[in-house]
Amino acid sequence: MDKFISIQEASLIIGVTTTTVRRWEKSGLLKPHHRTLGNHRRYNLQEILKLFNPEKEVKIKKTVCYSRVST
C-alpha cells in the first residue's frame, strides 16, 4: 500500500527546505503524486526514498506502544 506524505515530511527526508522542494517541482526535477482538494502536495514515500536513497532498502517501520494503568 502506498503512503503519501506532505511536502514538509518529504523535505525532512530529503534534508532540504520546503522552498527547495517547491523549486524542484517548478523546474520539473520532482513531481508530487497528486494534490488534495485543498491543493496540498502529496508525495509517494517509496518514490522519495528511491530517488534520494537508492542504495538503501526501502522499509517502513511501525512503532507500537502499549501502556497499562492499574487502579
Image (cartoon, rainbow, N blue to C red):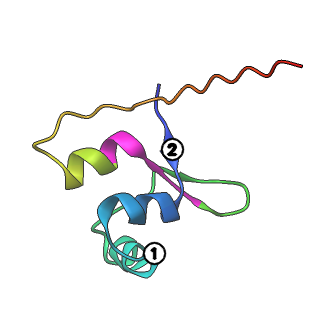
Rendered image quadrant of residue 55: top left
Residue at 51% over, 65% down: 8
Label 2 packing within 10 angstroms: few (<14), some (14-19), many (20+): some
Q: Estimate the x, y position of residue 24 in percent, counting from the top left.
A: 33, 74
Identify residue type, mark 1: Thr
Is 8 positioned to the left or the right of 70 in the image?
left
Which portion, as a residue range, is magenta? Answer: 41-47
Q: Residue furthest right?
A: 71
Residue at 35% over, 57% down: 13
Q: Estimate the x, y position of residue 40 in percent, counting from the top left.
A: 62, 62
Nearest to the observer: residue 61 or residue 25:
61
Q: Residue furthest left?
A: 55
Q: Estimate the x, y position of residue 28 in percent, counting from the top left.
A: 31, 70
Residue at 38% over, 32% down: 60
Residue receiving disc 1: 18
Would you say residue 65 sits in the magenta stretch?
A: no
Element type where label 1 sits in the image: helix
Identify residue type, mark 2: Phe
Q: Of the two numbered discs 1 and 2 on the same chain, state the one appearing first in sequence.
A: 2
Is 57 positioned to the left or the right of 40 in the image?
left
Q: Is the residue 41 above or below the residue 26 in the image?
A: above
Element type where label 2 sits in the image: strand
Residue at 79% over, 22% down: 69
Residue receiving disc 2: 4
Give the total number of marks visible in the rendering: 2
Rendered image quadrant of residue 46: top left
Quadrant containing the C terminus is: top right
